[in-house]
Image: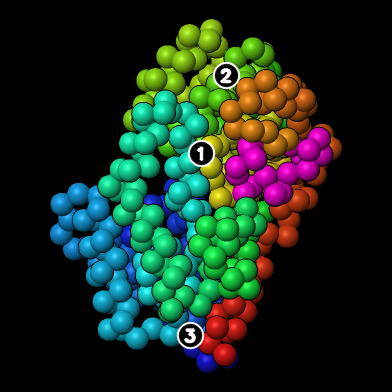
Amino acid sequence: MKSIRLAIVRQKYRPDGGAERFISRALEALDQQTMDLNVITRQWQGEKQNNWHLHVCDPVKWGRISRERGFANAARALWQREKFDLVQSHERIPGCDIYRAGDGVHQCWLELRSRLLPAWRQKLLMNNRYHRYVMDAERAMYQAPELKAVICNAHMVKREIVERFGVSSDKIHVIYNAIDTHQFVPVGESARQQLRQKLALPVDASLLIYVGSGFERKGLAAAIRAISGTNRYLVVVGKDKAEKHYRSLASELGCSHRVIFAGVQQDTRPWYQAADGLLLPTLYDPFPNVILEAMACGLPVITSTTCGGSEFIQAGENGYVCDALDIAALRDAVMALPENTVGSSMATHARERVMGSTPQRLSQQLISLYQQILD
């Protein structure tokens, strides 16, 4: 196969972001192929491999809409000038060849977020200028004649795109994210106890982990409410400017001694390995990488019906799926998990389910899609 000049567009590359981890894993895998890899970005904070070409696009901005529109225009001008064989955008920019819908459908997220708001705030949310801009850009991108393929990381998102935008289902390819199962591994009981001591976590407690920044979207309030009437602990890995509000909620519910805020962690592996399960009742999430990471570490997962990651969960076998706002169901699911998951059948089934999601498989699927488009 001849070398393909591929450009990947991502406005801000942040090493701990889910989309960025998809990009880095895809690029690492694609690096083995005959690819000329280019990244168009406003800001790249990760490590750059020597044979990736970085194109920094950072036009002046005066606000959120100006930032989005300015980057979209500058990135499109750059890729048109460079004449890449394929442009894969991870941003809603009309004119790309491939769009990866890693953030799902913006209107679906707004509708689900509205469930938490009073009626007057729901109207404000849907009419917000920034949200209107994003929804318009998304529609324009799906209607653009240049668009040849859409990559989704869940069938849930594929259904939403077909229903909302009328895109032909043949154009939409579900390619699940990859996980390195050699890096994310379960540990035995003694190693886990050592990890808990090192991380200052209660050694003998039944401990669930929540991983994610953006606490409202990822359902932290529901997670705290779910464990409040139980004896389970919750470790919160991630950050949010409203953290004080969630600490207060835990206090009000009388479980602040069982909710541990650990902040952002560069290496989440030991935190998964120290836990008994992942609790992520997210309001809306196409397919968070944390589900793959947790399952690879042998953790059963409790997540929501509006999370694409639920497609990997078999109820009672490797976790549970509940409505994000059904606290009673979430609490039942929490109590249905083994108190100690080390060596349990749930732990085994969780890891088995993700063993096929390798970077090599992701690479093969992407190469096959690129070849199909170029042919």
Number of marks in the rendered image: 3
Instruction: Of the two numbered discs 2 and 1 on the same chain, state the one appearing first in sequence.
Output: 1
CB under 8 Å between callouts 2 and 1? no
Identity of the amino acid at label 1? Leu
Measure the C-alpha gap from mark 3 to mark 1. 39 Å
Image point 37% across, 70% down: which residue? 94
Residue, disc 3 = 4
Estimate the x, y position of residue 54 in percent, counting from the top left.
Answer: 33, 71
Secondary structure type for disc 1: helix
Mark nearer the N terminus (2 vs 3): 3
Q: Looking at the image, tell me whether mark 3 or mark 1 is earlier in sequence order.
A: 3
Name which residue type carries label 2. Answer: Arg
- Is the C terminus in the top left, top right, bottom left or bottom right quadrant? bottom right
The amino acid sitting under disc 3 is Ile
Residue 317 horizontal side relative to residue 259, left or right: right
Q: Quadrant of the N terminus?
A: bottom right
**Which residue: 70% across, 25% down?**
329
Q: Quadrant of residue 85?
A: bottom left
Q: Give the range drawn in magenta.
A: 303-319
- In percent of the image, x 51 and y 39: which residue is there? 112
Q: 226 or 36, which is in the foreground?
A: 226
Label at residue 225:
2
**Which residue is pictured at 20% across the width and 49% down the height?**
63
Q: Which of 306 and 107 is in front in this view?
A: 107
Cα distance in 3D space between marks 2 and 3: 50 Å
Residue denoted by label 1: 112
Q: How crowded is mark 1: few (under 14 residues within 10 Å), some or many (20 or more)?
A: some
